[in-house]
Amino acid sequence: MKVLFYAKESQDVLAESDSLNKDYTYTLWKPMIISVVPLGVPKIPFIIWWAMHYLRLLGNRDYCLFIVYSGDTIVHRSCVFPRYFRFPFMDKDDLQIGDTWTAKEHRGKGLATFAIRKIFELNKKSGRRFWYVTEEANIASIRAVENAGFAQIGKGERLDRFGIKLIGSYLLET
């Protein structure tokens, strides 16, 4: 599968911060030993990432989820992943924003762009690069990451490992 790679450096100036419509609230959820996944988020695959976090299989301790609510309902989710085998192109302190989802009835309202900008703002660290990988055909995702001020730095593909997507990785070809 062909993918596009976007990046933004921590020292880059953040585009003017959006405000979230008053109908929405948000939180940056971080794993705790007694909080495996946030309420309303499916257990799989998030329990696996929680375990990887606690087993220290991720490049750093900054795994988290950015969640947007409408009332008590999750309407957007973006995950923040440190380096691990799926993202071999990343450095130890880098973060990748991915596994992004927005409920159909809330799409086109800027929630993904808002989430990307807030994740960047809340997780900035000297020397850190933020990554975003999306399929070439995902126009909405491309628009969101570009509106958040990220620049496309290359193309590549998602590779299966032993014929299994779950344990595959991304290859950055430039």
Image: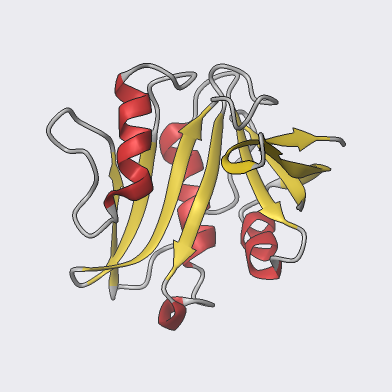
Residue at the image point whose x is 29% and y is 22% from the top: 54
Frontmost residue, 148 versus 95? 95
Please state the total of marks drawn on the protein image: 0
Left or right: 111 in relation to 44 = right
Left or right: 25 in relation to 172 = left
State whether residue 72 is above or below residue 58. below
State whether residue 135 is above or below residue 121. below
Residue at the image point whose x is 54% and y is 77% from the top: 108
Frontmost residue, 122 versus 166? 166
Q: Extreme right residue here?
A: 174
Residue 46 image-quadrant placement = top left
Residue 72 image-quadrant placement = bottom left
The quadrant of the picture occupied by the C terminus is: top right
Left or right: 2 in relation to 123 = right
Left or right: 44 in relation to 123 = left
Q: Position of residue 40 (x, y in %)?
A: 22, 60
Q: Position of residue 157 (x, y in %)?
A: 77, 44
**Is residue 49 shown to the viewer in this render?**
yes
Residue at the image point whose x is 56% and y is 16% from the top: 92
